[in-house]
Image: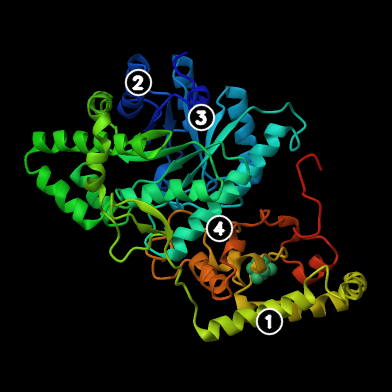
Amino acid sequence: MGSMFREDISDSKRFVITMELVPGEQSKGRSVDTVMSIADAALSDGRISAVSITDNPGGHPSLSPDVLGKEIVNMGMDVIVHFTCRDQNRVGIESRALQLGRLGIKNILALTGDFSGKGFAGQGAPVFDLESVSLLTMLKMMDEGTLTRGDREDFFVGCAVSPFKRTEEESLCQYFKLRKKVRASARFVITQVGYDVRKFHELLCVQRDWQMKVPTLGSVYVLTPTVARIMTEGKVPGVVVTPALLKTIQQEWKEKSNGRTATIERSARLAVVLKGLGYKGVHFGGIHKRFETLSRILDRMGRIEKRWRDFVPEFDFPHENGFNLYARDPANGLCSKKMNNRMSETSPVDKALFQTYRTIHRAFFSHDAPFAPLYSDLCARLEKSPFGYLLVKTAEDISKKALFSCRECGDCGIQHLAFFCPESQCPKHTRNGPCGGSRNGMCEVHPERRCVWFRAYRRWASIDESDRMSHDFVPPRNWELNRTSSWINFHLGKDHQGAPFVTSKG
Ligand code: SF4
């Protein structure tokens, strides 16, 4: 066996290099041969701690990372498997985790995942029964042996973060969610792709200031003009390549060999800058044909490493009018220790509506409210009376459909989302924070709509309580309660706020 990712990333002296492999829509043939030959070359090279394997990237069907991962592990190369929540419900996810344990694949990158793409006979059903934070929590319970009846697993689970968001709302939401992921035992972090060094630095500053010291790998994508254009058009969720960078790349590639050299140089320079800033390692993407490209980048890194400060100004591709959490340090263009003001506000009408919802919610849906025992008693009686139950359920449906576009999940989570419904307003039904796919404040799936987490942040910010978005883990909805009264469920302690955490142990 070559390098072991877990050991390498825990070694304080080691700078870790990983590389992403993307399986194709074939079980044999050229795409599989290419992936296997890159993995083989990476093993022979000896500088790569692990290859990561994507999980149906873009939501399109491709060869399972688990089966490829097993073959690559057998070859002697360590593997990180991407694990998304798009294609399976929690039962399928738990079963897949057991499968990975059995296969001996322990490194997992827990992701919510891109939205569903097209497969047999059209677009697939988006499942998103769990999202990244609940997936991390589930894997942690499997590690501790508190979820399944089997042996304790020994997973090494990490997560992703997108520091390259343009707006205050999205940036802070990403960091709040990262805090939840770290609390849910994320052992390593891999960033999304971007070319704004101040944002790369911002993430490290947030980790320092919010005490989230988790080894973090910065992503470096080996860009060609075609891929850069696709990324600039926003077709790869979460990835940011600005028009200015695209223009530079297109100029460089007017002559192909010049373009290739420039790409290798840019990748090596960004990698050494990340090392200089304090990243634990670099995660390379965009190596789809030959390992040789990465080998040249790594060689070049060795030669230019000491000059990393000189290259910092070259990675100044921010969003136009983009938000930064820290003021710019004029000495080096990175983050200073001074925080910028947060300016996010919602409209006075929306603020008033939000406060009204909060007041009502506190009065009727708090276990500490003065009349809570009375409501519980009443609900216990209503539950036994078919007519009474129907009456409450009808009143709940009419009011909540009108106000929140309620989908009758029976396990209400609006209070965690500033009184927006996670079932109707988020296509991925996230309850712990946004996915990484929003762009300029708009939803990945419905780009004409604001991301619901952006709107929720504005509401919390309007009362200066945005930080509460990073507080508690919100369990996934319990499907046993589907189409039942969430009001009655709450008062009888049956929903996620009252019931003991349900596990497959029963
Ligand atoms: S009960 Fe469920 S579906 Fe209805 S508003 Fe609450 S979270 Fe949304």
The residue under the point 32% across, 23% down is 38
Q: Residues within 10 Å of mark 1 (few under 14, many from 20)?
A: few
From mark 3 to mark 4, how far is it between C-alphas? 27 Å
The residue identified by callout 3 is 66
Q: Residues within 10 Å of mark 4 (few under 14, many from 20)?
A: many
Q: Nearer the viewer, mark 4 or mark 1?
A: 4
The secondary structure type at the circle numbered 1 is helix
Q: Amino acid at mark 2?
A: Ala
Earlier residue among tags 2 and 3: 2
The secondary structure type at the circle numbered 2 is helix
The residue under the point 78% across, 78% down is 363
Q: Residue furthest front?
A: 331
Q: Quadrant of ligand 1?
A: bottom right
Q: Classify 305 as above or below 482.
A: above
Q: Amino acid at mark 3?
A: Asp
The residue identified by callout 4 is 433
Q: Amino acid at mark 1?
A: Ser
Q: Classify 154 as above or below 61.
A: above
Q: Quadrant of residue 147?
A: top right
From mark 1 to mark 3, how far is it between C-alphas? 46 Å
Earlier residue among tags 4 and 1: 1
The residue under the point 60% across, 35% down is 96
In depth, the one of 323 and 432 nearer the eye is 323
Earlier residue among tags 2 and 1: 2
Q: Which mark is residue 408?
A: none
Earlier residue among tags 4 and 2: 2
The residue identified by callout 1 is 399
From mark 4 to mark 1, how far is it between C-alphas? 26 Å
- Image coordinates of residue 121 in percent, x first then y, are 43, 50
In depth, the one of 225 and 165 nearer the eye is 165
Q: Which mark is residue 42?
A: 2
Q: Does residue 195 appear left or right of residue 103 in this picture?
A: left
